[in-house]
Amino acid sequence: MGQTQSDRNPDRADLLGRAVAHHQSGRLEQAAQLYQALLSVSPADFEALHLLGILQYQRGNHADALKLVGLALKIDARSFQAYCSSGTILSALGRHEDALEAYNRAILLNPKYPEAFNNRGNAFRALKRPREALASFEQAIAARPQYPEALNNLGNALMELGQPEAALASYDRALAARPSYHDALFNRASARRLLGRLEEALVDIDAALELNPNAAASHTARGDVLLALKRKEEALQSYERALELEPRAADALAQRGRVLRELGQFSESIASYDRALMIKPGQPAILVARGNTKFAMGFHAAALNDYDDALAQKPNFAEAHGNRGNALRELGRHQQALEAFDRSLALKPDYEEGYNNRGNALNELNRPEEALADYDIALGLNPNNAYAWVNRGTSLRYLGRFQEALASFDRAIELHPALAEAHWNSSLLCLSIGDFARGWEGYEWRWRRGGAMQPRDFPQPQWRGEDVAGRTILLHAEQGFGDSIQFLRYVPMVAARGAKILLELPQSLIPLVPKCDAIIGLYCRGDRLPSFETHCPLMSLPLAFETRVESIPTVVPYLQTQDERLVFWQKRLADIPRPRIGLTWSGKTTHKNDHNRSIPLQMLEPILSIRGVHFISLQREYRESDALTLARLPILRLEDEIRDFSDTAAILSEIDLIISVDTAVAHLAGALARPLWLLIPHIQDWRWLTQRCDSPWYPTARLFRQPRTGGWPKVIAQVRQEIERHFRQGDQMTEKVNFPPDCDSIPEL
């Protein structure tokens, strides 16, 4: 054998040996000085050039590294190691095609060089060519079967090809070859997590953290697994630790935002997303996640802005289109929501939640048959989607297929026993079909649904019908004005049990409560309350009294009208001839079913054009869309004079008939025993039951139901006919007159 350059020059050999020793020990500065010393004497020293190039690569000086290795290759163009080093540096510079050429040169010079095959596989992966990467890693392993890095990389390529089981086997082999291999443990955890083996994934991540406790990415991954295990507080701690180690870790910030959202800490969640977006501006996934937090806070317009920004960056982001549709739904823009869902499904035809969400939009557009088809597709993709079963039940309820709907809700509960939406929707259906026994029990699940409806944090127990004689009970309002008005009927029944009652109501309802010796205090929400022994929300009183359809308290009136307001309105309306009809045609736009229950004023023109009848508006607010109609139709407006429900109650006492959609005014009219004609949409509230033209809650009410098809015109024509039947020109209607239900004239369901 011939002599090497080191053999011929013992001083050079000693210098190079010391340089390599420093290099291998991580003392890069000392090594660099020795390599430079060698090159100052011999500028064409191949080994010094090559090793200094590798050192500069390790320092991050990639351009200098490439130049040095290139000089080495000019000296020895057959060095497969130098070509492999050149490929590694080119990859670091993002020149992956050039790197492939360098690795191929190395392999041509040495077809059994495993490092070149392994590195070439990584270049293929960077070029999004996972199948070619897979083949290259397999060649590396064929050359060296116990090659941990190649086995680990093979697993990564298999993950990219959607083969987590095969990837897991490859990671196992890598760890068998090197049990303390941090990256393989980390990657095996990812495969196990994808396969749903979360506890095993957590074991792997913890083992990786024992090897490198300061790996921020491992702490983030640990948080992800803990979040999937529903261990949210621990997940948050892991994200916090990741951010201590790497404050600019955008992924950790984004995931921290997510877990904070799930913990209900919405402001902190948005702040975390904001920090992530400062690091990665315009990142679509983070924008969508921040939008989801705003959506959860009820800031639907702000959420929509985030989704729009995400789509500006990534127009084909199917999930962003889907979430945008949900925001549009909440904003009442149902047709636009449907278009957003259509777009999301065009981009991702197997998008399970996309079908579920589109079904919701179709339900809200009164297209339950189409909605049902979408839910069935979603359930075909995932039969265990409890939310899709709930929504499917809602469509069946709207279609009048009540037993099938109940079965659908029951299936959701079977899959997810703690799913409040399933119990809640089942209870609403039971109440609407008169199954009050099951309905009232299920109605208690309203407190677990989240959102604005939260239970009061009282240490005292909720009253459920036990002996309450001599005890002090707090009865407190919840939900809307109409709900409170409806269930105030139970207060005399609680008093009859011998209780001392504290009554907490919205301020505007307090004047309507009749005097009662049992009521020892009237309070508004936020007032300081005296001590009490038990409490009950007003809408839980039917459960406490085991109310059934036949035992609904029907004694009316159970509210009062203030004398001074009555005198005022008697004088105010004295010049308005009878018959007088009060109208309420729309409620608050924020009501979930407002698009079904409210009616454009223009549609009531056939009623308002009846001669000899004087119409009075009971609305306090008007929509812009009604402005032109209000200006040209004969209807008296009183909104500037109506201060609160005391005024409304007094006006109702001076009106011969109230025609109303499902609003608090309708409940007030019923509670005051005033003649009430109620216009009920096909998708109706549970309290009006089904297929009845009367109401067991309000004896003086008559129900006009919207047919399944045809909308409001048929109902309005029926109401006009009935007005003309009961009011002849010049006739008067007294307060004692009430209209008995006439079911023959009600549109068929």
Image (cartoon, rainbow, N blue to C red):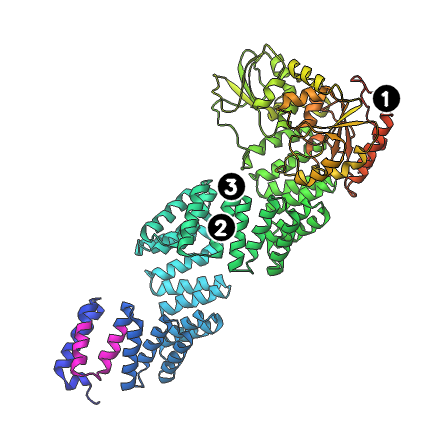
Looking at this view, name the residue that lies furthest to the top: 517
**SS under mark 2:** helix
Q: Residue at x 14, y 84 (%)?
A: 9
Indicate which disc, 1 or 2, sits on the residue closer to the N terminus: 2
Amino acid carrying label 2: it is Ala
Q: Which residue is drawn at 64% across and 44% down?
A: 391
Identify the disc placed on residue 289.
2
Q: Which of 75 and 412 is in front in this view?
A: 75
Task: Name which quarter of the figure residue 116 lies in.
Answer: bottom left
Say above or below: 485 vs 210.
Answer: above
User: Is label 1 in contact with label 2 (beta carbons under 8 Å)?
Assistant: no
Task: Name which quarter of the figure residue 609 lies in.
Answer: top right
Residue at which label 3 appears: 297
Query: 10 Å neighbourhood of mark 1: few (<14), some, or many (≥20)?
Result: few
Residue at which label 1 appears: 731
Q: Quadrant of the N terminus?
A: bottom left
Task: Name which quarter of the figure residue 114 lies in.
Answer: bottom left
Q: Which of 236 and 202 is in front in this view?
A: 236
| Residue 3 horizontal/vertical position (percent) | 19, 88
| Residue 445 horizontal/vertical position (percent) | 58, 33
Q: Which residue range is magenta in the image?
A: 32-54
